[in-house]
Amino acid sequence: MDLPLKKTFMPEKKPIIIANWKMKLGIGESKKLALELKHGIFGKKEVVICPAFVSLVEVAQILKNNHLKLGAQDCFWEVEGAFTGEVSARHLAEIGCQYVILGHSERRQHLGETDEMVHQKVRMALSVGLTPIICVGETFEQRQEGAKDYILIQQTTKALQGAVVKQNQKVIIAYEPVWVIGSGQAVSPAEASGAHQVIWQTLFDFFPSELVKNNFSVIYGGSVDSENVSKFTGLDNCAGVLVGSASLVAKEFIEIVKNS
Ligand code: 13P
């Protein structure tokens, strides 16, 4: 099958730029950064800010009625109940979140998050109207073993197989090679493009092609900065970027959005 080309495939989609603040900023720092971004980012791009849970409500107030969107970094797979310490996707939607990052490699690595858990969370996010940002990517060892494509297919399939994506719902898949996260050294655009093709092909295998074309986006994450961002957003099969470290400094993130 012909692989998607941006010109014909994603003509009306705006670049998606997502900031993942991880567990790096307190409430005061988050409010300050949100204000700086609110006053420094304009234009038509889809910019999503994902603060830590404790800062979400405050940042939601700052971004209210703004073109910057709010996302969470995780949610639980049950909508509510006796699940001490977990966070409900419905409650996230209630405070103004429109997106949620799921299956980030740091959760898979440090919290034992499995493909099955990611799948349950994707279903929950979709059921309350959140756009899931599903992270997939190989570790350095998996890459060395030649298992990269297998991992991408496996993680994408398991996250989505059997999920119901309605006509008005969006799904974002973020290719994040685990071994370049936080390293300051992104993969080459050609390498990202190859991985994206594998992900697109997997999506076409599971969902009707019109749905994939209209409702799915594939983005790149891993040591993105203002210097390299355009190389990724310029790819035919890349709809945007997921940014960690470089999203924590207002000037740099504003520059990333500009250059994307
Ligand atoms: P860095 O941009 O710091 O490599 O982090 C990427 C990431 O994990 C975003 O989710």
Image (spheres, helix red, strand yellow):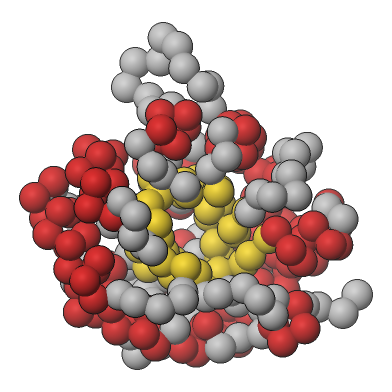
Could you tell me residue 107's position as x and y percent? 41, 43
Residue 39: quarter of image: bottom left
What residue is shown at x 38% (from left), y 24% (from top)?
Answer: 86
Q: Quadrant of the C terminus?
A: bottom left
How many numbered discs sit on the rendered protein? Answer: 0
Residue 144 appears left or right of 110: right
What residue is shown at x 11% (from left), y 55% (from top)?
Answer: 29
Residue 219 appears left or right of 111: right
Could you tell me residue 1's position as x and y percent? 91, 75
> Quick check: 191 above or below 249?
below
The foreground one among 120 and 54 is 54
Which residue is most to the left?
28
> Quick check: 217 above or below 229?
above
Could you tell me residue 38's position as x and y percent? 25, 66
Residue 218 appears left or right of 215: left
> Quick check: 27 above or below 191?
above
What residue is shown at x 46% (from left), y 74% (from top)?
Answer: 45
Which residue is most to the front?
65
Could you tell me residue 18's position as x and y percent? 41, 64
The foreground one among 89 and 112 is 89
The foreground one among 16 and 151 is 16
What residue is shown at x 42% (from left), y 40% (from top)?
Answer: 74
Is residue 190 in view from this perspective? yes
Which residue is most to the right?
1
Is residue 188 in view from this perspective? no
> Quick check: 242 above or below 253?
above
